[in-house]
Structures are given as structure tokens and as C-alpha cells.
């Protein structure tokens, strides 16, 4: 690298990290990084300084820039600059990708959509890694488990984040106050950057298991499908998919369910452990249940207890990318059983076909159900 080019190279980096660089200069910077191949050949210590030291400084500056405003940094640049620093400095470190709002969302990946529109693809993070933004830290605790930690005061962070799950996935998130939520396949959870001073409120679309940390001065509320659940500290499961009954199953503690009846009057009910509430439109049914059935998905199983075939097919559709077609009246077909979700779709259908009075066939991504 010529001395003039080396000086130019360093100036471009400084301009970019100072957020004072033109599009043409960005392209020039990308090209310079592309041209950095073999470190011993291309890196000139006299011109650029010690390789490891400069690499460390760059990584530190990148992290600082991410904290200031991650949204402004394009995907292409972070890929290039991180790869180049890792190659040139020999530092064992990692810079994780945060895509901008203009990037098309990958709906087949577990995604955390941040309040500023940034998308974090959680499967791309290694266990133990973390993404640090302007006012948050996202830490990958285990394969399907993250912690979301605000790093500012309660008054400075605003907006709503959303954890989005594709088909055939489970994921757990832990909030700073200790509550954990495990999301089932094809579900999403909206939560604020900071919980309010007098309440902790999240919004669920789909199914999730909640283990709520007790905080007497700060109720925990789950808004889902025309229903509000309020608790102090407890463990419960909520299943709230569109066009289906909202089912709440309580394992421990006490919860209050609130909804509007057919006259638009507010109604409230309390659940005790081992009780389940099923909300059908404006009507509710509370019964004693075996909670292990509602929680079978946490063990990666489908479990049915005299469930209608359409309910079962809804479960399969959420987990597998299939279309279901019904031929004739199948409303009187009910099935019981427990099946591992790790089995192939064809294996699951073979097991279901062991039930008398039902004929299920799989044609490509289409399931035909008939008597």
C-alpha cells in the first residue's frame, strides 16, 4: 500500500466513523477493504501503525458507533469492515449484524424487531455473544434463549420491540426484572424497551408460557386476542391465535382474566392452579385440567385430548408450511394422542391415520382430510 493510499485509507475510516462521509467515499472505502488480502503483504506498519493495535481501535470505534446509532449503518458495510478487521488484526472477536429497516425481513428466521426498525436475526448469534445498541444489550444465553437488557434509565427509552418466530421454532426471552417468556411456533411477542413504573405490559399473538417474577408494586399484564391477563408473580400458558379460542392455563399463583362480553360490559374471572379458561368470542368456560397437555409443546410434542381434527390441523399448519383442505363434513372427528414434533410430516399423518373414521393424505405441501 502506497503512503498516500494509506493516509487516504485512514482518513476514510475516520470520516465514516464521524458520520461525515459521502456515498462515493463509502464505495471507495469498501473497495479498499476488498483489496486487503494477505495481511503481511498488504499491511504497512510504518504507514498505518501496529496491525493489532489499529484493529482493536477500529473494533472499539465500531462498537461505539453502534451504540450511538446502529440504524444508520448499512448491512454491506458492517459485513466488510468486520471481516477485514478480523483478517488484518488477528483479533478473536465478533461484530454481529443488525440490518436496517429498509432491509426486507426474513420471515423464516427467528427475528427481534427493535423499536427503531432494526432487525436482529437471533439464529446468527453464537451462544455467549451479545449485540449492543444505543440503549440496550441483547445477550444470547443459550441456543434458543436471549436476555434483553436496557442500559439507560426508565425515562429515556421509548418504543416497542417485537420477538417474531417462524414455523417449527421455540424461543425464550428474559427481561431485566427476571420474567421469562417462552414463545411457541408461529407466535410473536411485543414488549416495551422499559416496563412502565407501575405495570409490566406485553402483547401476545400466538402461544407462550410465562414465568413471571413477583413484584407487588408492578403488575404483569398480557394482552392477547380480546383478553387481558393480570398477575403479580405466577406461571401460566396462553394460547391466543387469530380465529381460535383464547386458552389460558394456570400452573401456579393466581391470574385475573378480563374481557368484554356480548353487551360490551367488562367481565373479570380469576383462575386457580390447574384451571383453564377458554374464551370463545364473548363467552368463557373455566374447567379443571391436566396442565401437562397444554404444556406439551415445551417438550417439543403435539398432544391432543379428544381434540377435533380441525384443531389438530391448525397445529400442523403452524408448525409446517402446508395447506389443509377438508372434503365433506369432518366436524365429528376427534383424536387423542401425543406425537413428537421432531417427526416428519408424513410420519405424523401416518400416526393420525391410525384413528378409525379418518383418511388424511399428503400431496406435496397440501393435506387432504376426509372420512
Image (cartoon, helix red, strand yellow):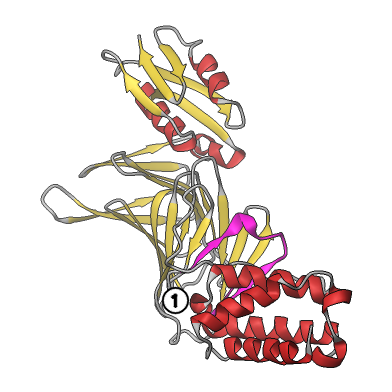
Picture coordinates of residue 114 (x, y %)? 47, 69
- In the picture, residue 88 is in which quadrant? bottom right
* Front residue of this view, candidates 344 and 281: 344
Residue 151 at least partly seen: no
Residue pushed farthest right? Answer: 40
* Front residue of this view, candidates 40 and 314: 40
The region drawn magenta spans 118-137
Crowd around label 1: few <14 · some 14–19 · many ≥20 (10 Å): few
Residue drawn at x 49%, y 76% is: 71
**Image quarter of the N terminus:** bottom right
* Front residue of this view, candidates 123 and 9: 9
Does the segment drawn in magenta span residue 337? no
- In the picture, residue 351 is in which quadrant? top right
- Whether residue 212 is situated above or below residue 341 in the rendered picture: below
Determine whether, in the image, residue 267 is placed left or right of residue 298: left
Residue 129 at least partly seen: yes
Residue drawn at x 37%, y 37% is: 287
Determine whether, in the image, residue 180 is placed left or right of residue 5: left
Picture coordinates of residue 278 (x, y %)? 33, 40
Does the segment drawn in magenta span residue 119? yes
Residue drawn at x 47%, y 11% is: 355
**Image quarter of the C terminus:** top left
- Whether residue 311 is situated above or below residue 143 in the rendered picture: above
Picture coordinates of residue 14 (x, y %)? 64, 91
Amino acid at each position: 500500500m502506497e503512503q498516500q493510499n494509506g493516509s487516504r485509507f485512514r482518513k476514510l475510516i475516520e470520516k465514516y466513523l464521524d458520520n461525515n462521509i459521502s456515498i462515493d467515499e463509502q464505495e471507495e472505502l469498501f473497495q479498499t477493504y476488498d483489496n486487503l488480502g494477505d495481511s503481511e503483504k498488504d499491511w504497512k506498519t510504518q504507514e498505518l501503525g501496529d496491525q493489532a493495535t489499529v484493529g482493536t481501535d477500529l473494533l472499539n470505534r465500531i462498537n461505539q458507533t453502534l451504540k450511538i446509532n446502529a440504524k444508520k449503518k448499512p448491512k454491506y458495510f458492517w459485513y466488510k469492515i468486520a471481516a477485514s478487521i478480523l483478517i488484518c488484526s488477528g483479533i478473536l472477536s465478533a461484530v454481529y449484524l443488525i440490518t436496517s429497516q429498509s432491509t426486507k425481513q426474513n420471515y423464516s428466521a427467528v427475528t427481534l424487531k427493535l423499536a427503531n426498525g432494526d432487525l436482529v436475526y437471533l439464529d446468527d448469534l453464537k451462544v455467549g455473544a451479545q449485540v449492543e445498541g444505543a440503549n440496550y444489550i441483547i445477550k444470547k444465553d443459550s441456543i434458543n434463549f436471549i436476555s434483553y437488557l436496557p442500559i439507560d434509565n426508565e425515562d429515556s427509552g421509548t418504543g416497542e420491540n417485537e420477538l417474531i418466530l417462524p414455523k417449527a421454532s421455540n424461543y425464550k426471552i428474559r427481561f431485566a426484572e427476571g420474567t421469562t417468556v417462552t414463545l411457541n411456533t408461529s407466535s410473536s411477542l411485543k414488549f416495551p424497551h422499559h416496563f412502565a413504573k407501575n405495570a409490566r405490559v406485553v402483547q401476545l399473538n400466538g402461544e407462550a408460557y410465562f414465568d413471571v417474577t413477583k413484584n407487588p408494586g408492578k403488575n404483569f399484564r398480557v394482552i392477547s386476542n380480546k383478553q387481558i391477563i393480570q398477575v403479580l408473580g405466577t406461571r401460566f400458558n396462553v394460547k391466543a391465535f387469530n380465529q381460535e379460542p383464547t386458552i389460558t392455563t394456570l400452573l401456579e399463583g393466581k391470574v385475573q382474566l378480563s374481557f368484554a362480553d356480548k353487551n360490551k360490559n367488562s367481565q373479570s374471572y380469576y383462575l386457580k392452579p390447574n384451571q383453564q379458561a377458554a374464551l370463545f368470542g364473548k363467552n368463557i368456560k373455566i374447567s379443571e385440567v391436566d396442565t401437562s397437555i397444554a404444556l406439551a409443546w415445551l417438550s417439543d410434542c403435539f398432544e391432543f385430548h379428544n381434540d377435533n381434527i380441525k384443531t389438530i390441523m391448525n397445529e400442523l399448519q403452524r408448525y409446517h408450511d402446508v395447506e389443509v383442505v377438508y372434503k365433506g363434513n369432518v366436524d365429528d372427528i376427534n383424536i387423542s394422542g401425543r406425537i413428537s414434533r421432531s417427526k416428519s410430516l408424513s410420519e405424523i399423518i401416518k400416526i393420525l391415520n391410525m384413528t378409525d373414521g379418518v383418511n388424511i393424505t399428503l400431496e406435496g405441501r397440501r393435506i387432504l382430510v376426509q372420512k
